[in-house]
Image: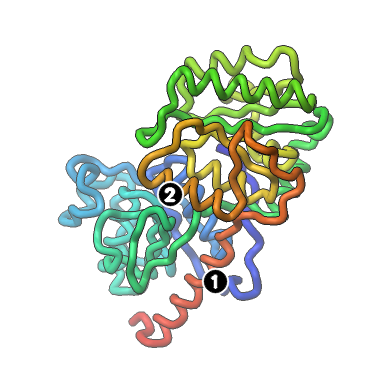
Amino acid sequence: MTQPIPPPTPSAHTRAPDSAHAWAISDGTAGNERQALALAGAMGLATSVHRIALHAPWRWFAPRLTAAIQLGMPSAQRGLLAPPWPEFAIGCGRQAALITRALRVLSGGATFTVQILDPRVDPAQFDLLVAPRHDNLEGSNVIRTLGALNPVDAAWLSTAALEFSTLQQLPQPRTALLVGGPHRELLLDADWFDGLIAQLEALLGRDGGSLMITLSRRTPTAWAERLRGAFHSGCAYFWGSARDGANPYAGYLAHADRIVVTPDSVNMLSEACATGKPVMTWLPHPARGKLAAFHAALRAQGLLHGLGEADPAMASTTSLREAPAVADEVWQRYRARRAQSPPG
């Protein structure tokens, strides 16, 4: 969703040897690719990006159908599953899981495989599995996070602030609105959307300042059209697609004084909470399933607040920055594994 901002600066514990190389594997969706790159960046790895689009029936059953896997890949990508093998394969999403699973077998263990998100197969099929707590996965090789991995840290925000420096001219308080789309575990109907706009109008009416709106690929056209024409009484900066120019999403996170996120997106909520700024959502009817557990966990740590509830302090003391800790853990597990059985 954002401009290409550099990944987190790796710590001394995560800095990789110059020769270490990783593949970041996904189906090309922004959220999945972003998580794989965030972990590779936090580990300090030189990284190649591979976007896999499997053919049927491999796509339907990924990552369960491993037979003749090369036939399930686009012809231009079939040569990937051959030496030289990368030191690391970091996959995110179910289609990527088929490739990371295959690499572990085909490389004879030369490639250390890390799969992000629940692959819906036994975690033992991978060297490590990284999944949010609300996925309820257990295993000796499972690293559990609260939210989605992302590159947001102080250096990332500073770079974004410089890249989108014109946003600092907008009047304060600057409120960023990050908009996703419908979700099966949420009631995001017309009444919900009316309530969201009413709450934002009340916030702007009370505090003044400016509103910075950005949409995602999942945002319905009806929402986009209404948001583009809303808030004429306040200072609103709108981004809906490439026709509006460069996506200022990263700049919004850097320059906002507070952030409002629709409750559907684990990725956007995680990134907003990584800024250390107050994060709010509009959710008059609680979510169901895993999303409800995620919201509850954020609230329990003081990271997420309800729009229209008592306003959170403008200066936050907590932030959700999990990529460096996960990177440290991956390096420790990798080195322990290699010490026990060096790749042959």
Residue shown at the point (44%, 63%) measured from the top left = 144
Query: Label 1: few (<14), some or many (≥20) within 10 Å?
Result: some
Front residue of this view, candidates 242 and 237: 237
Residue shown at the point (32%, 45%) measured from the top left = 76
How far is disc 1 from disc 2 in space, using C-alphas? 26 Å
Residue 279 x %, y %: 63, 42
Do the residues bearing badges 1 and 2 touch, measured as CB atoms within 8 Å? no
Q: Amino acid at mark 2?
A: Ala
**Quadrant of the frame with the N terminus:** top right
According to the picture, the residue beneath numbered tag 1 turns out to be: 328
The numbered mark, 1 or 2, whose residue comes first in the sequence reads 2
Residue 241 x %, y %: 56, 24
Callout 1: SS: helix
Residue 265 x %, y %: 48, 39
Residue shown at the point (71%, 48%) measured from the top left = 157
Callout 2: SS: helix
Total labels drawn: 2
Q: Amino acid at mark 1?
A: Asp
Query: Label 2: few (<14), some or many (≥20) within 10 Å?
Result: some
According to the picture, the residue beneath numbered tag 2 turns out to be: 293
Q: Splitting the image into 4 quarters, where does residue 97 fall?
A: bottom left
Q: Is residue 329 left or right of residue 71?
A: right
Q: Is residue 213 left or right of residue 299?
A: right
On screen, residue 208 above or below 143: above
Residue 83 x %, y %: 34, 66
**Quadrant of the frame with the C terminus:** bottom left
